[in-house]
């Protein structure tokens, strides 16, 4: 049994959402969702809604191919590939944390599907960040053994199609499940949140991290606030590098919250923002 403070990602992870959709359509597969977790010393398993969730210990190591290390996940993955009939679905195609998996796992033995998420291939970074050449070379060696790709962006779709064939790539963007996400009346949402009808509200929902738009929005927060615009930051987690600064600077900043609560903020806001440095 996992300690009380260990939380299984049963609703928010993209891999969990996809797994739930598969279970709704067929009982042909036994599905496991794997995640990393800091500050635990063993693997914990829990079956929820027909899906077996496994969380693996991880720790940070400054000098390595990936700052996040997770040896127990790698050894378990290798065993599954060698001993069982499995399909591997990778989420976060170009994330640096994927490099140990690419180096460790033999994808030529099993079917592998990969979904591209936010990060771009290091191919596009080489001019400005030449040290990412190692990531690029590892991807070049590994990706030919991936059987199918889901690409989130058109640029990524074109990039993968040219290298691995159009038949192996689908331009697939995650949408919103409106059976769960149901906007409510703006004035009703504001009343429940204690906001006035006339207040201008700007909402950012996402990580409180410097590699996300939160950094840009935080830099212009004083100006927005001086103009009478109420800025809401939602989605903070204590491990985010801007977490303390945002929490101390912005009174209307909140940690990650259940979808039912987040819907209130989306419904009440005048503008949803995701600013860019460009």
Image (cartoon, rainbow, N blue to C red):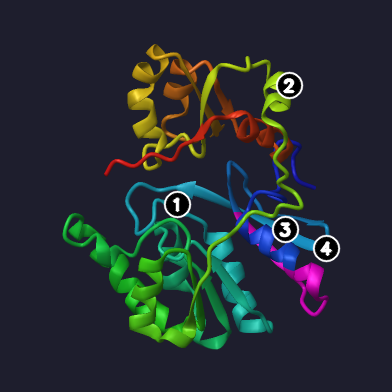
Residue at position x 70%, y 43% from top?
A: 7
Residue at position x 37%, y 42% from top?
A: 211
* Image mark for residue 68: 1
Q: Position of residue 221 (x, y in %)?
A: 38, 22
* Image mark for residue 50: 4
Q: CA distance from mark 1 to mark 3?
A: 20 Å
Q: Is residue 20 above or below residue 103?
A: above
Q: CA distance from mark 1 to mark 4?
A: 29 Å
First of labels 2, 3 by sequence position: 3
Q: CA distance from mark 2 to mark 1?
A: 41 Å
Foreground disc of the pair 1, 3: 3
Q: Position of residue 179 (x, y in %)?
A: 76, 53
Image quadrant holding the C terminus, namely: top left
Q: Secondary structure at mark 4?
A: loop
Q: Position of residue 73 (x, y in %)?
A: 58, 62
Q: Position of residue 130 (x, y in %)?
A: 18, 60
User: Which residue is under mark 3?
Assistant: 53
Q: Secondary structure at mark 3?
A: strand
Q: Secondary structure at mark 2?
A: helix
* Image mark for residue 192: 2
Does 51 sit left or right of 230 as displayed?
right
Residue at position x 71%, y 46% from top?
A: 181
Q: Are marks 4 and 2 in contact (CB under 8 Å)?
A: no
């Amino acid at each position: 049994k996992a300690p009380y403070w260990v939380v299984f990602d049963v609703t928010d992870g993209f891999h969990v959402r996809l797994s739930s959709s598969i279970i709704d359509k067929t009982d042909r597969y036994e599905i496991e969702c794997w995640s990393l977790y800091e500050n635990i010393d063993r693997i914990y398993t829990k079956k929820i809604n027909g899906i077996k969730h496994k969380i693996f210990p991880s720790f940070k190591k400054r000098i390595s191919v990936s700052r996040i290390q997770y040896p127990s996940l790698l050894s378990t993955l290798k065993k599954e590939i060698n001993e069982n009939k499995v399909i591997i679905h990778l989420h976060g195609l170009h994330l640096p944390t994927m490099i140990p998996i690419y180096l460790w796992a033999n994808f030529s033995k099993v079917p592998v599907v990969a979904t591209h998420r936010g990060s771009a291939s290091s191919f596009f970074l080489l001019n400005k960040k030449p040290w990412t050449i190692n990531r690029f070379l590892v991807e070049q060696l590994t990706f030919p053994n991936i059987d199918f790709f889901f690409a989130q962006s058109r640029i990524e779709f074109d990039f993968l199609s040219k290298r691995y064939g159009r038949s192996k790539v689908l331009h697939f963007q995650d949408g919103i499940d409106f059976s769960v996400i149901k906007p409510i009346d703006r004035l009703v949402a504001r009343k429940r949140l204690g906001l006035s009808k006339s207040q201008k509200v700007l909402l950012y929902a996402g990580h409180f991290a410097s590699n996300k738009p939160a950094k840009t929005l935080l830099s212009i927060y004083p100006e927005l606030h001086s103009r009478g615009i109420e800025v809401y930051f939602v989605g903070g987690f204590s491990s985010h590098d801007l977490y303390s600064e945002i929490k101390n600077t912005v009174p209307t900043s909140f940690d990650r919250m259940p979808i039912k609560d987040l819907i209130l903020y989306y419904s009440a806001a005048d503008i949803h923002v995701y600013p860019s440095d460009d």
